[in-house]
Image (spheres, rainbow, N blue to C red):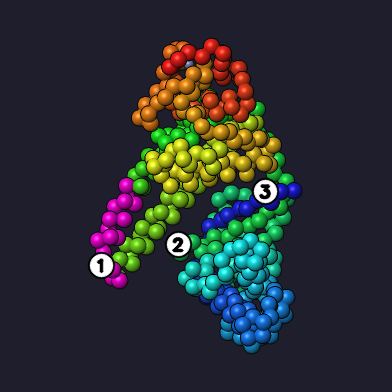
Amino acid sequence: MAVRSYKYRLRPNRSQSAGLDGMLRDFCGLYNACLQQRIEAHRRRGIGLRYGHQAAELKACRAADRDGLARWSFSALQQVLRRLDQTFTAFFKRGRGFPRYRASARYHAATFRVGDGLSVKKDRRIGVVGVPGGIKAVWHRDLPPGAKLATAILTRQQGKWYVVFSVEATFGEACGSGTVGIDLGLGSLIATSDGEMVEAPRHARRAQKAQRRRQRALVRCRRGGRRRLKAKARLAAGSAKMARQRRDRLHKLSRSLVSRYRGIAFEDLDLTGLKKGMLARSVHDAAWSLLVQLVRYMAGSGGAEVVLVDPRGTSQTCPECGTLKAKTLSTRVHACACGCVLDRDVAAAMVVHHRAFGLGPGHGLRCVSGRVAA
Ligand SMILES: [Zn+2]
C-alpha cells in the first residue's frame, strides 16, 4: 500500500465560502491562543506544555465558546493543536525558528480525518461540519478503485478552495521498458537521449510577458493606495496561475516519461547550480527540481529507476567519441570532428544517458580510446 495525494478544486457558494473563511479564522485564533498559553506557562511557571495538556482543555474551551469553536469539528480542532505541537518539535529537535503567531490572512489550511468532520456525501459533494450544505467539488479525475481515504486537508489558495485527500491504495501502473537520459535545457524544457525535445509551451511565454506588464503596473502605483492593492492582487493571481499550469505540464510530462521508460537519468541538480551560473533563472530551477521530484514520485510506485549523474561537462562532451568540445551557451548545435552532428541539448542528454546506464545500442561513447583533439 502506498499513500498519494489527490487534490480537487472546491466551488463553495457564498455562504459556504464565508463559513470556510470563518472556520480558518477560528482555527487561527485557537492556534495563537495555544501558542500564547505555552509561552506564558513557560515564562511564569517554567512549565513546558505539551499537546496532551492543551488537548485536555479543548473540550471545556469549546463548550464555553458556543458561537465560536463549538461550531467546528472536534477532531479538526485537535489537529490545530497538533500542528502547533509540530512547530515546537521542529524548533526543539530540528533547530527551526521559534513558533510565531500567525496572521489570520496567512492561515490557509485545516486538516481533517475523513468521516470525522469532513465527509464525501452520496451526491459527491463535500460535507464539512459547521458549513451549511454540501460543497460542490470538481472531480477532474477519479480516486483509485478501492482507495481508503485517510486524511483530508482543506486549503485556501489565492481565494480558491481545494481539498487534498491522502489516499491509501495499491497503485499498479507499470513503467515502460527502455532507458533514457534527460537534459534539462535552457532553450527547450527538456531534451531526451532519444532525440525528443519538449518545448516550453507558447502560452507560458505569453503569460510571462503579461506578468512583466503587471509588475510594471504595480511599481507605478502610489504606495498605500487602493490601486496598488488591486495591482498586487492581479500580479499574485497571475503567478499562481502560471505555477498551476507549470505543475500540470510537468505532471503530464513525468507521467509520460515513466510510462515509457524503466530507467530515467537526470543531471544531479544539487551540483548544477554553479555550472549554469547567472543564466539560470529561478523559475527554470524550480521547474527542473519539480520535474525530477515528480518523476521520482511516479517511478517509485511503477518500479522505474531514477539515476542522478554528475552534471560536469555534459554539454561539452561528444556522445559519439567522448571528445571534450568546448561550446559557449549560444552554440546550439553539437558538431564534432568525428562526424557527429546533433542538437546541443540532445547530445548532452545522450551523455547523461551514457553516464547513468553505460553503452546502449545505437548510442553511447563508441571509442573512448580514440580521442581526437578538438
Ligand atoms: Zn565526436
C-alpha separation, residue under disc 3 versus residue under disc 2: 28 Å
| Residue nearer the viewer, 24 or 161 | 24
Disc 1 to disc 3, C-alpha distance: 51 Å
Seen as rendered, the residue at the extreme right is 1
Estimate the x, y position of residue 49 in percent, counting from the top left. 68, 77
Per the image, the residue denoted by label 2 is 158
Task: Using a 10 Å C-alpha cutoff, classify the residue at mark 2 as few (fewer than 14 neighbours), some (14 to 19) or many (20 or more).
Answer: few
Vertical arrangement, residue 209 with respect to residue 350, above or below: below
Q: Earlier in the sequence, mark 1 or mark 2?
A: 2
Identified at 35% across, 30% down, the residue is 330
Q: Residue at x 39, y 59 (%)?
A: 236
- Provide the residue span drawn in magenta: 209-225
Residue under label 3, please give it: 144
The circle drawn on residue 222 is 1
Q: Secondary structure at mark 2?
A: loop
Determine the residue positioned at 59% across, 36% down: 308
Q: Is residue 171 above or below residue 309?
A: below
Q: From what the image shows, is residue 59 above or below residue 252? A: below
- Please identify, in this view, whether the residue under mark 3 or under mark 2 is nearer the observer: 2
Assess whether mark 2 and mark 3 are in contact (beta carbons under 8 angstroms): no
Q: Amino acid at mark 2?
A: Gln
